[in-house]
Every structure is written in structure tokens, then in C-alpha cells.
Image: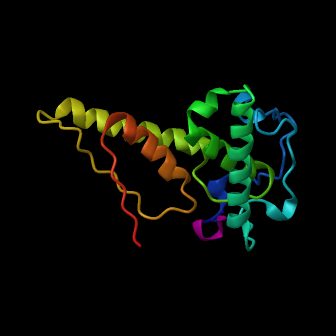
Amino acid sequence: MTNKDEDPFDCFGSMDDEEDDNKDNVMDEETRNYCPVKRVRELDCGVLSFHPSTESSLLVHVRNVIQQQQQWSSNGKDSDDSRKPYLVVCNAINEYCEERHWMMHVGPEKGQIVTQTLYDCIMEKKNNCKTWNEDFVCVELGTYCGYASILLADILKKISTTTTLKKP
């Protein structure tokens, strides 16, 4: 196949909806706390499907998960995630995108790459800069629903001072 004949969406891999028979379909322990039964996303909500109000629906889902987490915590069913609220939000987004509607977020796999790269850059500057004063500039230009921003902010708050700006 020539370059002009290549599918521009090959970089996304195979369709999420085309399940591999050998793939284990079990969620990790962290996500299982929020939804004991894995739902199967409808075909018309798969990769590169865009529908109105998807983002609003995601917000409602995240709010519901947070409320559920707060109820569990108040009933003594405190999970490890309740000590890390950003994980509750990221896991809720992952769950929504996996089970309800595909959205173009960084996601957990690429999120690990992004956070590790940022951490490595900060550590390199810290180790090679004679006048390290915890100043490190990290700019995220644009964001979809804030998934990557949450990951970046978590790394930055552990290592550096964090200042955020938002256009009014």
C-alpha cells in the first residue's frame, strides 16, 4: 500500500469494538471498585464516533462516581483512591470511555508515558542545574476534558510549585 492509500486512523490501532478472543476482559482492581460488572460499549459509540452531549454525559458520570466514592468513604468503605481524588476522576473517565462512549483522551497507557516523560525532564533539569529553585515551566496548550491536565498537575505538585492560568 502506498502512503496515500494508508488509513490515516491506523495510528489508533484496531477498532476497540473488535474484541480479541484471547484478550482478558477483566478490569484492573482499581477500576473494578467503581463498576463490578463491565458494560460493553455500543458499536455506534466506538473509536472516532462523535455525538452531541457526550462531554456533558461524561461530567454527570464523573460526578456520580465521586458521590458514590464519598458515600463509600462515609460508610467506612474507604478505598486507596479516596486518598487520591485525581485517581477517582481519571478512573471514572477511563471507565466511561471504555464502557459507554469513546473519547479522545490521553488514557492510562499514554498517560504513563506523558507523566514519566515530564518527571524525567524535571529530574534532569534538577540534577543538571546548579541553581535549581524548583522553577519548571510546563505548558499544556489546549485540553479536551482535562485528563492530561490532571496527570501533569499531579506530577508537578509532587516536584515543583504549580501555578495555573485560565482565560476568563
Image quadrant for the N terminus?
bottom right
Q: Is residue 166 magenta?
A: no
Q: Nearer the viewer, residue 138 or 79?
A: 79
**Which residue: 73% across, 36% down?**
31
* Extreme residue toward the left, this view: 130
Question: In the orientation shown, which residue stands out farthest toward the front?
Answer: 74
Q: In the shown orientation, is residue 77 left or right of residue 127?
A: right
Residue 162 relative to residue 27: left or right = left
Q: Residue at x 16, y 35 (%)?
A: 129
Q: Nearer the viewer, residue 168 or 113?
A: 168
In the image, which residues are magenta?
Answer: 3-7
Tell me: residue 107, above or below residue 22: below
Residue in view at x 65 percent, y 55 percent: 12
Work out whether 142 lies above or below 130: below
| Residue 1 placement, left or right of 39 | left
Q: Nearer the viewer, residue 154 or 104?
A: 154
Judging from the image, the colouring scheme is rainbow
Q: Residue 71: where, in percent of width, then height? A: 74, 38
Task: Determine which quarter of the picture holds residue 105.
Answer: bottom right
Quadrant of the snapshot with the C terminus: bottom left
Most frequent secondary structure within the magenta stretch? helix
**How many numbered tags mark residues here?**
0
* Rendered image quadrant of residue 109: top right
Image coordinates of residue 150 in percent, x first then y, are: 50, 48
Q: Position of residue 63 (x, y in %)?
A: 69, 52
Residue 151 sits above or below residue 80 on the image: below
From the viewer's side, name the closer residue of 158 and 101: 158
Q: Looking at the image, is 112 positioned above or below residue 147? A: above
Q: Residue sitting at 63 percent across and 27 percent down?
A: 80
> At which x and y percent is residue 100?
80, 55
